[in-house]
Amino acid sequence: MSTSSDRREHIRHSVSWRARIALEDTSMINATVTNISEGGISFQCDTFIPTGSLIKIEFYFSHQQKSAKVRAAIKVTFNTVMADNKGAQIGAIFVKIAPQYEAMLKKIVEKLEDQSKNGPSDSFGKLRILDK
């Protein structure tokens, strides 16, 4: 029997990045991105978001010693309440992303793949969470 991870088109990479989520009612919540691929993203937040919800995400990381961000529209495909009802783990696919952010996302994932094979790259630096 195959699982959803067996059918994934893209490899996911573990990260810990700060993010902001715009819910369907336009309210904003904070989140932490926990993994990413060219096709989707997973994050933890304090709010349960139903499967099928169309929301917007903006996440932040370090790129060449500077803050960088990516914005995208995503569709929730997975959700689970975390232990002790302390938030939710949400999985989503990218449904709309501007070309400049799509190019940046591709570079991010390529660098994460390089890092997983060779360690951090001097030209890109280790991708990490940013605090404002």
Image (cartoon, helix red, strand yellow):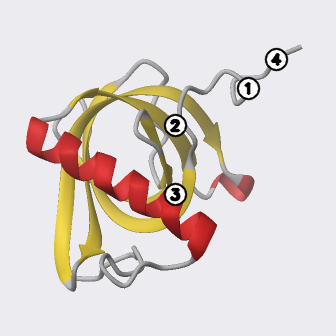
Residue 2's disc is 4
Q: SS of the residue at dot 1? A: loop
Relative height, residue 83 to residue 131 (above, below): above
Task: Look at label 1 and name its amino acid.
Answer: Asp
Q: Do the residues bearing badges 1 and 3 touch, measured as CB atoms within 8 Å? A: no
| In this rendering, the label closer to the viewer, 3 or 2 | 3
Where residue 27 appears, x then y in whole percent? 20, 44
The residue wearing badge 3 is 113
Task: Look at label 2 and name its amino acid.
Answer: Gly
* Circle 3 crowding by C-alpha within 10 Å: few under 14, some 14–19, many from 20: some
Relative height, residue 40 to residue 106 (above, below): above
Pick the front one: 68 or 17: 68
Where residue 22 appears, x then y in whole percent? 22, 43
Q: SS of the residue at dot 3? A: helix
- Quadrant assignment for the C terminus: bottom left
Pick the front one: 60 or 25: 60
Q: Residue at x 58, y 41 (%)?
A: 11
The residue wearing badge 2 is 91
- Quadrant assignment for the N terminus: top right
Q: Do the residues bearing badges 4 and 1 touch, measured as CB atoms within 8 Å? A: yes
Where residue 52 appears, x then y in whole percent? 42, 18
| In this rendering, the label closer to the viewer, 4 or 2 | 4
Looking at the image, is mark 3 or mark 2 earlier in the sequence? 2
Q: SS of the residue at dot 4? A: loop
Q: Do the residues bearing badges 3 and 4 touch, measured as CB atoms within 8 Å? A: no
| In this rendering, the label closer to the viewer, 1 or 3 | 3
Residue 6's disc is 1
